[in-house]
Image (cartoon, rainbow, N blue to C red):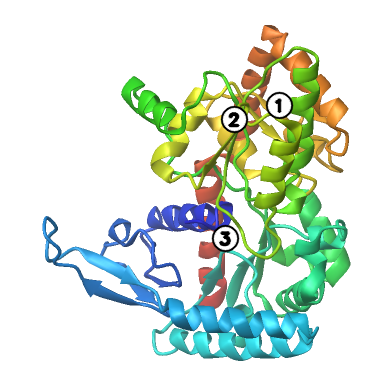
Amino acid sequence: MKSGGVYQYAVNMLAAFKENKKHDYIIFTLSPDFPFEDFKDSNWKIVPIGFKRIKNSEEGKSVNEEKSVAPTFRRKINLLIINLLRALRLYRVEIFLARLNSKKRALNFEGHGIDLMVYHGPSEMSYLSNIPSLVVVHELQHRFNRQFPEVWSLGQWEKREYLYKNVAKKATIVIVEIDQNKREFCEIYGRDENTVEVIRCAPPIYLTKNVSEEKKKEVALKHSLPPGFLFYPAQFWPHKNHRNLIEAVKILRDKGEIFHLVLPGSKQELWGEYEKVLQKIKDLKIENQIHLIGYADNDEMSALFALCSAMIIPSFMGRIQTPTIEAWFMDKPVLQSNVPGILDEVFDAALLFDPSNPEDIAEKIHSFSKDENLQKQLVLNGKKVLERWSFSNLSNKLNACIDRFDKKSAR
């Protein structure tokens, strides 16, 4: 769950498949916190990879309740080896070892009579297995934003290129979320456009607009939140641009305008900027306005949306953001980075700003806060655009894609 949007995307795909009763499904999961109880139908089978499930008979719990256990020691050893290879710049060796590990994992797929493997993101297993594959490619931002270490340093650029080239070459079906991603993927990697489907994602299925007053009070009290804050749920990667957003809050305070900013997100290692963000807040002396609440679980997120006045997204990467779709669904106005291609997706359903300019971010926050008509119009516009990003749209197109493959395979 702590992987954020990628996890929610995967769960949405599974929920879409549950509506298609014509097929049998096998879930191979690496997630110890996978929602096992949601997939107990007769046409579903779950195969954990890399961890064991044991019966939990602790006091107060049913002996039939199941608990997931991950081999944390082995994971730590693997991370140590990876960090050593990266320190020595032996990126090709890391790619080779990752390939061996993926090939070993792909052996789990054998013996199940599988016709099609579905991957909710680019995976080496998709081209190391001989089973036909459907692979989702979320974005190609490493091609356009090389200034960020999470997409170019320590061999990340090379690994992404290696991954996408092989996916383009071997995948039976490729799914992207917007038209521009399709054009870029086909142009860069030479993929036939007829084998790439545009299927937009949807708001996470756990979100609900029906948040009780008790729940809102509980979450606000837990995190000491003021009413009407700006909300930005994101991991603390450099490209997420927390620091310019915090600078904008300071600019507004110097002008006598007080805005509170709530930033959920787990502390990330390696390229994570949590400590730098924390230091920025201290340097600007605005600790009482910036609320770092840590990882927020599904149960809290709906309440946080209900409590906020707007979603603000200063990220340098990504034309459409999962929080944008979530905000539209929760009837909240959106302020967002004006990155190339963004207008083709949000149209007039977001107030855009220059993410590299804290002054412009501050100006847009100011103008938004003073214009109630603009706030209402953004919500109305968001509802209209959300029709393209609905769960029914995702489910219908994804299942139609699977059914077409089924018929083609039969022929």
Q: Is any atom of residue 129 visible in this view?
A: no
Q: Is residue 300 left or right of residue 6?
A: left
Residue 281 location in percent, x, y?
70, 37
Question: Of circles 3 and 2, which is in front?
Answer: 2
Q: Is residue 169 left or right of residue 259?
A: right
Tell me the residue at 52%/18% (across/down).
227
Q: Dot 3: few (<14), some (14–19), or many (≥20) neighbours within 10 Å?
A: some
Q: Are marks 2 and 1 in contact (CB under 8 Å)?
A: yes
Residue 189 location in percent, x, y?
83, 71
Q: Is residue 155 left or right of residue 389?
A: right
Tell me the residue at 71%/61% (across/down).
271
Q: Amino acid at mark 1?
A: Ala
Tell me the CA gap for discs 3 and 2: 26 Å
Q: Nearest the camera: 293 or 100?
A: 293
Q: Amino acid at mark 2?
A: Trp
Report the residue marked by disc 3. 401
